[in-house]
Structure formats: structure tokens, C-alpha cells
Image: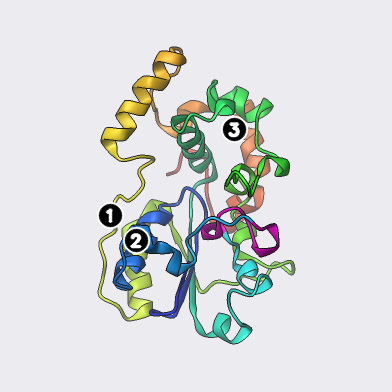
Amino acid sequence: MISHHDKCVFVHLPKTAGQSIESVFVARHGLDWQQREALLLKPNLDPALGPPRLAHLTAQEYLDYGYLTPGQFRQYFKFAFVRNPWSRLVSEYHYRRLHGDLAYQRDFKTFLFKHFPTPDCDDHTLGKDYFRHVLPQWRFLYDEQEQCLVDFIGKFENLQQDFFKVCQSLAIPLQTLPHKNKTLASGVRQRVKQKIKRIFPWMENKRHYTDYFDQESRDFVGQLYKKDIELFQYRFGAE
């Protein structure tokens, strides 16, 4: 997301409350959510212009695809939020499953070891960005020389307080974040959940993220996101 009004860039890592944050800046532009394309929050059909959803550009890609000049990139305040990798992956699993994606209509461990997204899962024509959703978080925020490209990294686990810090850095009024996309609006979410459960009656209800892992799957995710865990200081079960 680019807000020229507030001279900032939000690097939206999937499943880190990004739409709640974006909605604040959409409103500050005097727009409603249906007009969010003005902040580069839109689908993309052309691989030469970035990923299938431009909301999920990496920090480096804002430069590589020409959405910001080097001068703007230096001048604008760049921020992002990260999340416990185990929790984030369970959230992604629920998000896709609730939207009816067939690869996710199975138990979590089977999804993890047999149906985990690969690069060829992404499709610009269909607007699919499965693989980008599970990229290691550091890849959104660091360049090839492993230099951090953003000015502030908040944590999903401390979302509101860290967003207040963003507001202070931008010298804008403190904003309380709405629950913009808690997977789906509650009424719609309930109807979709009931429909999917009729088709897949074995589906379990949501539990704490730690309940989805045995030692094998816990270690798999720990290795997959090892750098995220080290850089952002996460531990299994600590959040």
C-alpha cells in the first residue's frame, strides 16, 4: 500500500491484520473500501507488474516494478507487521479453507506435508496468490544483501500498541484499528462455515494454534521459517 497523502508505504504481509491497517489509510484519503485501488490495493493480471495482488508487494518490489522512485522510497515511512510463524500458518489454513479452496479441505498436517503451496500455485489470471501467502516474512522486508528496507516492524501480537507507534511516526491522530477482515464478516463466515461442514463433516472447529501441531509438523514449520523465528524473536507457544 502506498499513501502519498501520508507519505508512507505499508508492506502487507498476508495474515497480519493488513486490511485493518489499510482501511485506516483508505479513510484518510476520503475513500471507501471499494475505492482502495487508489492506494495500489488491487488485483494484477500482468506478471511484469508484480504479484497477482499488489497489496502483497515486497518492499523491494515497490522499487523493482517502479511504483516508487528511489527518492520516494527513501523519503516515505515504510512499515510492516509480522506474526508468529506457526500461528500465521494456521490462520492461513483457516482462511483458505473457509473460502472453499479444496487443497485446504483436509486436516492441517495433511495440508502441510502433501498440499503446501508451491510457486506454480500462483495465477495472475485467476487472482491466486497461494504461494506468496506462505513466503517467509523476512523476504518481504529485506533485500538480497539481507538489509532491512523498512523503518518499523510491528508485531501482530501487539497490533494496536504498535500501530499507535506508526501513527506517532507519521504525526497523524492515533487510530483504533477495526476488525476489517477477521477471515470473513461474522454472518457470512457462519453461513460459509455451515455449508462447508455439510460437505466436509469431519472438519474440526478452530482451536489454539499450538493444538494443530505434533512434533514433526512443529519442526517442519520451525525449519521452513527459521530465519523469521530468529529475526523477529518468536517461539512456539509463546504468543
User: Where residue 205 sits in the image (x, y, percent)?
Assistant: 38, 23
Q: Residue at x 63, y 51 (%)?
A: 136
Q: Looking at the picture, which amino acid does disc 1 mark?
A: Pro
User: Where residue 4 sits in the image (x, y, percent)?
Assistant: 44, 79
Can you see residue 214? no
Measure how far apart labels 3 and 1 are at the Cα level.
Answer: 31 Å
Q: Residue at x 52, y 85 (%)?
A: 75
Mark 3: which secondary structure? Answer: helix
Nearer the observer: mark 1 or 2; the answer is: 2
Mark 1: which secondary structure? Answer: loop
Nearer the observer: mark 2 or 3; the answer is: 2
Residue 176 versus residue 197: which sits nearer the camera? 197
According to the picture, the residue beneath numbered tag 1 turns out to be 178
| Badge 1 vs badge 2, beta-carbon distance below 8 Å | yes
Q: Tell me: residue 28, above or below residue 234.
A: below
Q: Tell me: residue 160, above or below residue 100.
A: below
Q: How many marks?
A: 3
How many neighbours does mark 2 have within 10 angstroms: few (below 14), some (14-19), or many (20 or more)?
some
Measure how far apart labels 1 and 2 are at the Cα level.
Answer: 8 Å
* Mark linked to residue 218: 3
Question: Is 137 on the left or on the right of 35, as rendered?
Answer: right
User: Where residue 57 sits in the image (x, y, percent)?
Assistant: 58, 61
How many neighbours does mark 1 have within 10 angstroms: few (below 14), some (14-19), or many (20 or more)?
some
Q: Earlier in the sequence, mark 2 or mark 3?
A: 2
- State which region is magenta: 46-56
* Mark linked to residue 23: 2
